[in-house]
Amino acid sequence: MDPTYMGNDEAGAILAVMGGFMLVFVAIMIVVAIFYLLSLSKALSLAGENNRQMSPGLVWLNLIPIFSLGWHFYTVAKVAEAIRNKYAEAGVDDPGNGGWPLGLTVSILNVVVILPIPFINMLVAIALLVVWIIYWVKIAGYNKAMASMAAPATA
């Protein structure tokens, strides 16, 4: 028997392992997406009903494949608007514009990364990951700040 020959059993085993890794990867990505969307939903909740134009529950529509490519634009616009309104209500300056520039960049990169351009896709995917993490951290910072705005002052 030729040692370089791979039989059906070996090929099947390799495919099974690769499939298992893909399932684990997809599961991890879904969990990460849920935590990310929790942050966006929390931002809308903390902004207050009078400061938002979108229900926090609508953030979860971003879990729908393909649809989320467009819905993410709407979501980040409404989250940024709610944050700006909350800051204005509190009389606090917001130099980050509610995270709008970063959120818009994430939305654009989300669309560009699916275009079938081989080498560019990899570079865009790396840029998307970096900007997405920065945006998520920015929203988490806004959440912390808005939570402290809502807390009553103690004397």
Image (cartoon, rainbow, N blue to C red):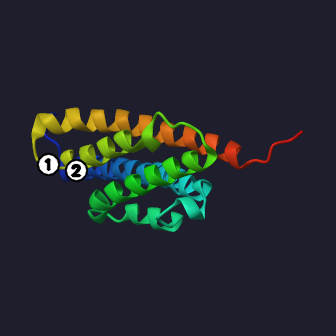
Circle number at residue 111: 2
In this view of the protein, which residue sits in the foreground, 53 or 27? 53
Q: What residue lies at 40% left-to-right and 66% top-to-bottom?
A: 61
Please tell me in which quadrant of the rendered image residue 99 appears: top left
Q: Residue furthest right?
A: 155
In this image, 137 relative to 3: left or right? Answer: right
Q: Secondary structure at mark 1?
A: loop
Helix, strand or loop under label 2: helix
Residue placed under numbered mark 1 in the picture:
115
Nearer to the camera, 117 or 28: 117
* Mark 1 crowd level (few <14, some 14–19, many ≥20, 10 Å Cα): few
Residue 83 at x, y percent in the picture: 51, 49
Q: Position of residue 31 (x, y in %)?
A: 49, 52
Q: Are marks 1 and 2 in contact (CB under 8 Å)?
A: yes
**Residue at 52% across / 52% down in the picture?**
85
From the viewer's perspective, tell me whether residue 116 is left or right of residue 53.
left
Q: Position of residue 5 (x, y in %)?
A: 13, 40
How far separated are the C-alphas under marks 1 and 2?
Answer: 7 Å
